[in-house]
Image (spheres, grey):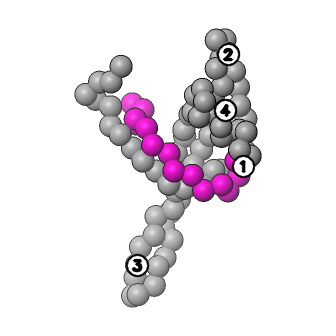
Amino acid sequence: MATINQIPMTIMGNLVSGLEPKRTSGGKTVVNFRVAQTSSTERNGKWEDGAATFIRCVAYGPIAEHMTESGMGKGTRVVVTGPRAA
């Protein structure tokens, strides 16, 4: 159920570690993972990396199954979209 307080968020970055899928009591696959995102800024015509931000994410069901079956691992570039948790 959607609520007015959910803020959509899209991030792009790299997986911090390998995926460790788990199963819920109902049999659904769940994957908890972290994404590292580094901002870049331009200074004097050159791009410089800023500080890294680490974002915790979770995927359920078919998306989680696809992530594990496709061989995603540490360093894989990903784009994650979903509601921001409170």
Q: Which disc, if any, is residue 27? A: 2
- Three-letter amino acid code of the residue under disc 1: Gly
Height in image: 5 above or below 16? above
Task: Give the position of the N terminus as an image quadrant.
Answer: top left
Asked which secondary structure carries label 3, the reply is: strand
- Classify residue 84 by image quadrant: top left
Residue visible at 40% across and 82% down in the picture: 43
Residue range (magenta): 72-86
Residue visible at 54% across and 56% down in the picture: 13
57 and 53: which one is in front? 57
Residue under label 1, please give it.
Answer: 73
Q: Is residue 10 left or right of residue 66?
A: left
Is 85 covered by the magenta stretch? yes
Asked which secondary structure carries label 1, the reply is: loop
**Counting residues from the N terminus, which is met first, the one under dot 1 or under dot 3?**
3
**Counting residues from the N terminus, which is met first, the one under dot 3 or under dot 2?**
2
CA gap, disc 3 to disc 2? Answer: 48 Å
- Three-letter amino acid code of the residue under disc 3: Glu
20 and 60: which one is in front? 60
